Image: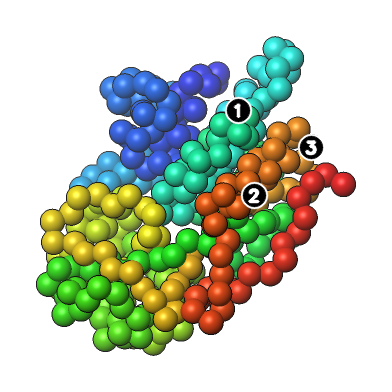
């Protein structure tokens, strides 16, 4: 059986986006062309790879089994082309925490970091695996223990977090809120709370007893649910561009201000020549935009910042 790399690439991108429209945009093809590639691949394999329904797109069991070797096949094809062309492959950078729009930070430094090729990781474990396997060169997202052995990370941004809530919430008219004031509200989470480390730790620290979970179908859908629940709230980094949702309020938090920590992660053994440039661009932007300001007397972090491992190949 001969696999078509374009079809496999279409599958991998769709599997990681779990959204045909976004995957088509990433691949710069029409959604119709993407659907045809997936259909031809499913026909060749004799198995459905996706479930499509009212709850969005999900991988079937066959799709879940196919995804890891499919990623490797795409990476191998790209490496083969680069070997023949003699061209240095672009720095492969992945992100996670998609609901909080990490791409906006990469956009700030991409021009200074050289050519970047973006991946589609869904969470820290999947991105860590890709780093350790050499499928990507670096990644950006929130790091929390345990980080697998063999990886290093450096803090690049501490972003203040706002509360988002319905305009019918009893506290919606407040100009700012202390986290303790939300103790009697329901924390609305875009997935199981035990898999969402920041929200989980916030609830523990500030005594939030009531929680509710949703299905992550994107920021607009999630915030629409929050706006429809007068006793609920959630947390979103302050600089995330919010979609226009009727009935939604965003309120700053203070005393303490929660901070969402973004880190750059890499394998110290990676010898890509542009890796140091990416780290330098992150540090330059952090200095220019005051990304790393932290005052333990008025800010809150689940894990206070420590001196991260140095960046480089020595």
Residue 283 badge: 2
Residue at the spot 44% in from the left edge and 79% down from the top edge: 256
Q: Which quadrant, please, contains the N terminus?
A: top right
Q: Is residue 231 left or right of residue 273?
A: left
Locate residue 64, reporting x and y percent: 47, 45
Secondary structure found at label 1: loop
Circles 1 and 3 in contact, beta carbons < 8 Å = no
Within 10 Å of disc 1 (Cα), the crowding (few <14, some 14-19, many 20+) is some
Q: Earlier in the sequence, mark 1 or mark 3?
A: 1
Give the label on residue 115, or none: 1
Residue 247: image location, x then y, percent: 13, 61
Identify the residue at image location x=38%, y=60%: 238
In the rendering, at what x and y percent does residue 296 appear? Answer: 56, 78
Q: Is residue 161 visible?
A: yes
Residue 17 in the image: above or below residue 146: above
Query: Are dots 2 and 3 in contact, CB under 8 Å?
Result: no
Q: What residue is drawn where x is 53% and y is 82%? A: 297
Within 10 angstroms of label 2, few (less than 14), some, or many (20 or more) residues? some
Q: Give the number of the mark in front: 2 or 3.
A: 2
The secondary element bearing badge 2 is classed as: helix
Q: Mark 3 falls on what kind of element?
A: loop
Which marked residue is nearer to the observer: mark 1 or mark 3? Answer: 1
Disc marking residue 271 = 3
Relative to residue 245, is residue 289 drawn left or right?
right
Residue 153, above or below 116: below
Identified at 49% across, 28% down, the residue is 9
Q: Check residue 143 in the rendering and tell me which mark sits there, or answer none.
A: none
Q: Nearer the viewer, residue 231 or 147?
A: 231
Residue 198 placement (x, y as % from top left) = 47, 69
3D distance between C-alphas at marks 2 and 3: 20 Å
Q: Do the CB atoms of the residues marked 1 and 2 lie less than 8 Å apart? A: no
């Amino acid at each position: 059986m001969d696999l078509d790399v374009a079809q496999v690439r279409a599958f991998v991108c769709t599997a990681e986006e779990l959204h045909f429209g976004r995957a088509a945009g990433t691949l710069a093809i029409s959604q119709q062309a993407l659907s045809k590639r997936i259909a031809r691949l499913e026909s060749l394999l004799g198995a459905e790879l996706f479930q499509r329904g009212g709850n969005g797109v999900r991988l079937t069991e066959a799709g879940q089994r196919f995804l890891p070797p499919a990623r490797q096949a795409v990476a191998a094809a790209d490496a083969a082309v680069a070997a023949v062309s003699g061209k240095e492959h672009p720095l492969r950078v992945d992100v996670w925490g998609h609901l909080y729009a990490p791409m906006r930070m990469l956009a700030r430094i991409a021009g200074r970091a050289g050519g970047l090729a973006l991946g589609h990781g869904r969470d820290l474990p999947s991105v860590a695996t890709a780093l350790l396997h050499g499928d990507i060169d670096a990644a950006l997202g929130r790091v929390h223990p345990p980080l697998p052995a063999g990886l290093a990370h450096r803090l690049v941004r501490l972003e203040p977090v706002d509360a988002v809530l319905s305009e019918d919430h009893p506290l919606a008219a407040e100009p700012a809120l202390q986290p303790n004031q939300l103790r009697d509200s329901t924390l609305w989470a875009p997935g199981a709370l035990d898999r969402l480390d920041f929200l989980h730790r916030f609830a523990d620290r500030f005594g939030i007893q009531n929680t509710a979970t949703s299905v992550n179908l994107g920021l607009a859908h999630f915030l629409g649910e929050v706006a429809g629940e007068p006793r609920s709230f959630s947390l979103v980094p302050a600089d995330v561009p919010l979609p226009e949702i009727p009935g939604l309020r965003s309120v700053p938090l203070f005393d303490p201000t929660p901070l969402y920590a973004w880190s750059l992660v890499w394998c110290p053994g990676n010898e890509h020549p542009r890796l140091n440039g990416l780290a330098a661009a992150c540090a330059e932007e952090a200095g220019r935009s005051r990304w790393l300001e932290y005052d333990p007397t008025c800010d809150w972090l689940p894990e206070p910042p420590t001196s991260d491992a140095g960046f480089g190949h020595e």
